Amino acid sequence: MKGEAMRLYLRILGWIVALLGLFFAVAGAELAWLGGSLYYLLAGLAMIAAGILLSRSDRRGALIYALVWLATWLWAVWEVGFDGLQLIPRVVAPTVLMILVAWPWLWRSATRPPARRMAATAVIAGLVLAGAYAAFAPRTLSAQAAVSAATPKPSTGDWTHYGGTLAGDRYSSRAQITPANVGQLQLAWTHRTGDLVMPDEAVKHLREYHSEATPIHIGGTLYTCTPHSYVEAIDATTGAAKWRWHTDADITGNSYLVCRGVSYYEAPAGTACAHRIFAPTFDAKMYALDADTGKPCAGFGKGGYIDLRDQMGVSPAAFQISTSPPVVANGRLIIGERIIDNVGVDEPAGVVRAYDPISGAPVWAWDMGRGDDAIKPLTGDAIYTRGTPNVWGAMTADAANGIVYLGTGNATPDYWIGRRRPFDDKYGTSIVALDIATGKMRWHRQLVHRDMWDMDVPVGPSLVDLPLPGGGIVPALVQTTKMGQVYLLNRLTGAPLAAIVEKPVSTRGGIGDEAMSPTQPFSVGMPSFTPPAPSETTTWGATPIDQLICRIQFRKAHAAGIYAPIGTTDIIGHPAFDGVTDWGGGAVDPERAIFTVNTMEMPFRIRLVRADSAQGQKMIAAAAKGGENAKAPIYYQQFGTPYVAVVQAWIGPFGAPCSAPPWGKLTAVDLKTRQVMWTRVLGTARDTGLFGSHLGFPLKTGVPNLGGSIITRGGLVFIGATTDQYLRAFDLRTGAELWKARLPAGAQATPMTYQGRDGRQYVVITAGGHGALGTRYGDYTLAFALPKTT
């Protein structure tokens, strides 16, 4: 590099360093004023001086920056130790800049004696290695010793229900695939549904398109559904389409499109359309389709469907849709629905209704506004109680004991609770156990009091018979929650099998016209996955720039962590509405009494804005356009209340999370000892790049995940769910990741498994992408199996 070129290089580099220093000095001064770290202010002032000197080709500028770099390392290690992932935003970018600053002098050393040249080269090599260590050092999570496998017991079922069985255990008795041979799994077939994302969903974001379906397996056929309400029958061994059905309903006005699965019912012999698939659709209908032909069952309901808007009053189309499969048990078809979040107080009812699965005639309706027990279905102009907590996730059932289990949400809207009614407070965010035949209340247990955080119970519990220490069996359920609390209850009575304690929580900082609960129930007898409250030290980001902005946002927030009261100043809700676990739930091995659950950490900034303010009116207008994207602010109108709610993922300006990784984990728990067996980081940042791109580095950060895990008798845990595009298999005993397959689109769905006609065990996953998580769209159903044997 010639002298003039060197001076130009140093001039440009110097101004870059100085301008960065100016940013750090100004923003660092704000952070210091808020009570935060002084590092950024001091480093910024030193960088201004270093940059000015560098621009004048003065080597003292390089010396000053070298001291800043060294101080940065010392400060970083003092804050977070040698945690490689935590060091990334603190030292990687400064190290890259250090290399650029040192480069001119390294070049000059090439003309100097060998000893100096070697010393300079060693310095640069050390910088590169230090940066590489910070970027790629693995994160190790502690794990306890695994329990030994129990003696296998008879197990039936071949994924005939959404959760594997009515119990929602997500367990399969198939054992052909084992830890010893899972590495040989290969793609057996690919099926394309043809239901692709539309421009209004992928580009304009007017609607949310979430592909979350788990197929069911009946008699050698898979049955599945898609966001635009296609239902398909697929040959389970070849992947060939058998039939396809689609509603011709107008999609206009719908803002949320999801179908998580369908249900199967076999009517008594001699009944027309004896083999039935019950399929929910985006226009709030429940169809009965002939499982053999795909045609609507003419004798069911109104020529093949039930209109779930009956007796619900008048609302826009988007306010009420069906997203999860119904429960079919003991001669009852039981249906809950998704009611739109946060638009207003006068939304449709969260009523749960039971129908005759043959005729479609209504049998009972659980409308909490009309009492604890279900009532006879309404007729005429009568409507169910508006705005009550709804049941939008998959339900589970104990057919032998005649109980269906519901996970309830919140009365609308979520983020301001000043007008909740007594029955809203009683049944919101609860597990409710109803008699399948009559709808009579068996028991209920509330998991969050006066919920203002959208912590609705997103899936029914997993049921399991647990061995007692002194012998015998107890009928149990395991309930995962958005809060990261796991509840272990007697499923017949609701009594705790693991201790639950009411703990005090803060009520300071909310809105004065709301009454908040001073305590919340914590499941202290089970492992907790509730993340610790964020702190300035645990903020993250891709670079010091976005970490500094995240630190300022944290300092400006009036509270952080679980149950922080929502007010007119930001809180850092952690966990937030996507939860620690969501609709994927957990999986239970009933033979070994092992429970697995995937968790995530995805904080959100939440605040309220007066609806009658100019800012509030702009937000209401923006919300009317529809759609959601977690990376952008979400404005909830909350009509009928004084406030608009503003909810936004806590993400820095470059698109990196403000909370420190790992952001996703998979954990196994021994239900007999109630101890964690192992925990593994789940997912990499390969498909999660800066600025919302899919071009990330495969750092083992763990990632946000939606969808659940499954367990097989073969001793494996299979899971998709992550924002990187993989289906993975883990050893149930040790937690070791044994196999993974790259997928063509995001797989925010729970896998399933069964035995095909050729005798092979198949593992199937839906990969269609997820609008809110920003994963790649597609229309794939993919099956994996061991190689064929001759």
Image: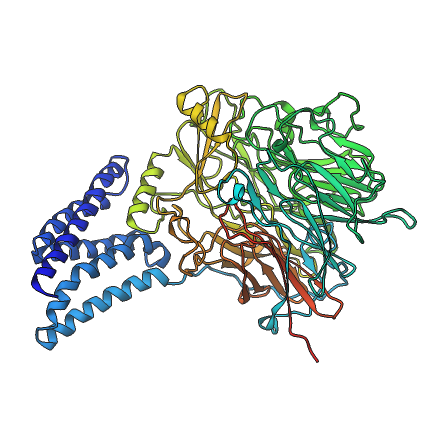
Render colour scheme:
rainbow
- The residue drawn where x is 33% and y is 59% is 82
- Position of residue 714 in the picture relative to residue 657 (left or right): right
Q: Is residue 316 above or below residue 86?
A: above
Q: Position of residue 449 (x, y in %)?
A: 57, 32
Q: Position of residue 698 (x, y in %)?
A: 42, 61
Q: How many marks?
A: 0
- In depth, the one of 710 and 1 nearer the eye is 1
Q: Considering the image in quadrants, where does the C terminus appear?
A: bottom right
Q: Is residue 41 above or below residue 669?
A: above
Residue 411 visible (yes or no): yes
Q: Position of residue 208 (x, y in %)?
A: 55, 41
Q: Which residue is at the far right?
A: 270
Q: Considering the image in quadrants, where does the N terminus appear?
A: bottom left
- Position of residue 790 in the picture relative to residue 452 (left or right): right
- The residue drawn where x is 29% and y is 52% is 90
Q: Quadrant of residue 283 in the image? A: top right
- The residue drawn where x is 78% and y is 33% is 440
- In depth, the one of 595 and 188 nearer the eye is 188
Q: Is residue 380 above or below residue 525?
A: above
Q: Position of residue 424 (x, y in %)?
A: 63, 27
Residue 578 visible (yes or no): no
